[in-house]
C-alpha cells in the first residue's frame, strides 16, 4: 500500500504532436497510483491520439492550440469525475512519471494543497533544460517571491494540486502563462505550497517553446506579463475553506 492509496487521482497530459513519446509517458505512471489518465490531444497532426488510447488513456480533443487551452479542457472533464487530486504532466517524456508519488503523497497526507515538481532541486540530464529556460525560471520565481513571499525554484509542468483548491483558483490562461498563473494564484490564495525534487531528461523531439527563438520570446513575454498583471492586484485572495 502506498501513501497515496485512498486518494482519487486523475492525471491530465496536454499533448501536441507527441506520438513518439506519449505511450512511454503513460506506461511509466506507477500501476495503481491513479484512477484515470487523460490525454488532451491539442490539435495534433500526428498519431498522438491513437498511441495514447493504445496505452490505456482517455483521450479528449481540444482544437484550440495552447497549453492552457488543453489544461482547461482537462479540468472541465475532471469536474464530472470529482477527483481528490489532479496531476499535470507533460507528454514529451522529459518528466519521470514514476516519481508521481513524491508530488501526490504530501497532499494525500494533508500536508499540502499544491506541490510543484522542481527540476532545480532534482537531478537533470545534461542539456535537458536549455540556458534560456534556466534564466526564465530564476527570474520568474524571484519575482513571485519578492511580490507574494512564496519561495519557488521552478515553473515546472509536473505538478499536483487538490482539485477543490484548483477550482478555487479559477484558472484562465490559454497559452504560455499557465504554470506561472497557477503558482501566483496559489500564493495569493494562501494555499499550502510545497516543492518536491524531480528528475528531468531530454525530451523526445524538439520543444515547442524553448526549441526556437520565437517560442522562447513569446513564452518569456507572456510569463512576465502574467506576473505584472497579478502584481497590480491585491496580494492575497479572501480566505475561504476548501
Image (cartoon, grey):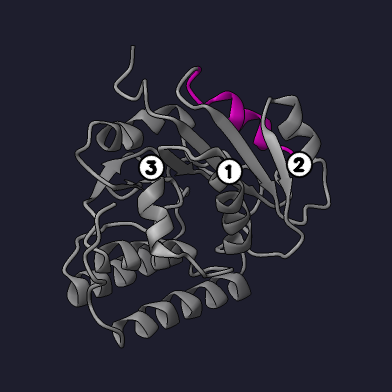
Cα gap from disc 1 to disc 2, whole angstroms:
24 Å
Point out residue 241 in the picture as x, y percentages from the top left corner: 24, 55
Residue 164 located left or right of residue 231: right
Earlier-in-chain disc, 3 versus 2: 2
Earlier-in-chain disc, 3 versus 1: 1
Q: Which residue is mark 3?
A: 124
Q: Which residues are magenta?
A: 19-31
Query: In the figure, 177 relative to 230: above or below?
Result: above
Q: Which residue is mark 1?
A: 80
Q: Could you tell me which secondary element the residue under label 3 belongs to?
A: loop
Q: Nearer the viewer, residue 10 or 21?
A: 10
Residue 189 bears which disc, if any? none
Q: State the image quarter where residue 158 is shown.
A: top left
Cα gap from disc 3 to disc 1, whole angstroms:
36 Å
Look at the numbered discs 3 and 2 and tell me whether their residues touch, using CB distance below 8 Å: no
Give the number of the mark in front: 3 or 2.
2
Q: Magenta includes 3?
A: no
Q: State the image quarter where residue 182 is shown.
A: bottom left
For mark 3, does the 10 Å Cα neighbourhood hold few (<14), some (14 to 19), or many (20 or more) residues? some
Query: In the figure, 55 relative to 75: above or below?
Result: above
- Looking at the image, which residue is at 60% across and 43% down? 91
Point out residue 13 in the picture as x, y percentages from the top left corner: 58, 44
Q: Which residue is mark 2?
A: 48
- Looking at the image, which residue is at 38% across and 49% down? 164
Give the number of the mark in front: 1 or 2.
1
Q: Could you tell me which secondary element the residue under label 1 belongs to?
A: helix
Amino acid at each position: 500500500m502506498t501513501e497515496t492509496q485512498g486518494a482519487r487521482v486523475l492525471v491530465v497530459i496536454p499533448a501536441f504532436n507527441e506520438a513518439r513519446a506519449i505511450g512511454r509517458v503513460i506506461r511509466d505512471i506507477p500501476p495503481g497510483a491513479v484512477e484515470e489518465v487523460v490525454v488532451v490531444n491539442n490539435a495534433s497532426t500526428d498519431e498522438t491520439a491513437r498511441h495514447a488510447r493504445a496505452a490505456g488513456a482517455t483521450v479528449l480533443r481540444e482544437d484550440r492550440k495552447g497549453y492552457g487551452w488543453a489544461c482547461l479542457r482537462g479540468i472541465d472533464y475532471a469536474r464530472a469525475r470529482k477527483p481528490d487530486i489532479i496531476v499535470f504532466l507533460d507528454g514529451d517524456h522529459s518528466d519521470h512519471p514514476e516519481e508521481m508519488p513524491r508530488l501526490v503523497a504530501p497532499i494525500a497526507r494533508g500536508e499540502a494543497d499544491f506541490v510543484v515538481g522542481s527540476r532545480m532541486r532534482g537531478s537533470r540530464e545534461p542539456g535537458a533544460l536549455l540556458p534560456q529556460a534556466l534564466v526564465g525560471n530564476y527570474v520568474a520565481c524571484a519575482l513571485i517571491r519578492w511580490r507574494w513571499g512564496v519561495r519557488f525554484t521552478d515553473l515546472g509542468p509536473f505538478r499536483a494540486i487538490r482539485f477543490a483548491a484548483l477550482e478555487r483558483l479559477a484558472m484562465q490562461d490559454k497559452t504560455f502563462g499557465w504554470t506561472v498563473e497557477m503558482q501566483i494564484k496559489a500564493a495569493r490564495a494562501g494555499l499550502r505550497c510545497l516543492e518536491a525534487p524531480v528528475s528531468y531528461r531530454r525530451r523526445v523531439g524538439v520543444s515547442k517553446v524553448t526549441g526556437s527563438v520565437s517560442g522562447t520570446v513569446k513564452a518569456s513575454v507572456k510569463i512576465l506579463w502574467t506576473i505584472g498583471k497579478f502584481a497590480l492586484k491585491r496580494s492575497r485572495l479572501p480566505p475561504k475553506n476548501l
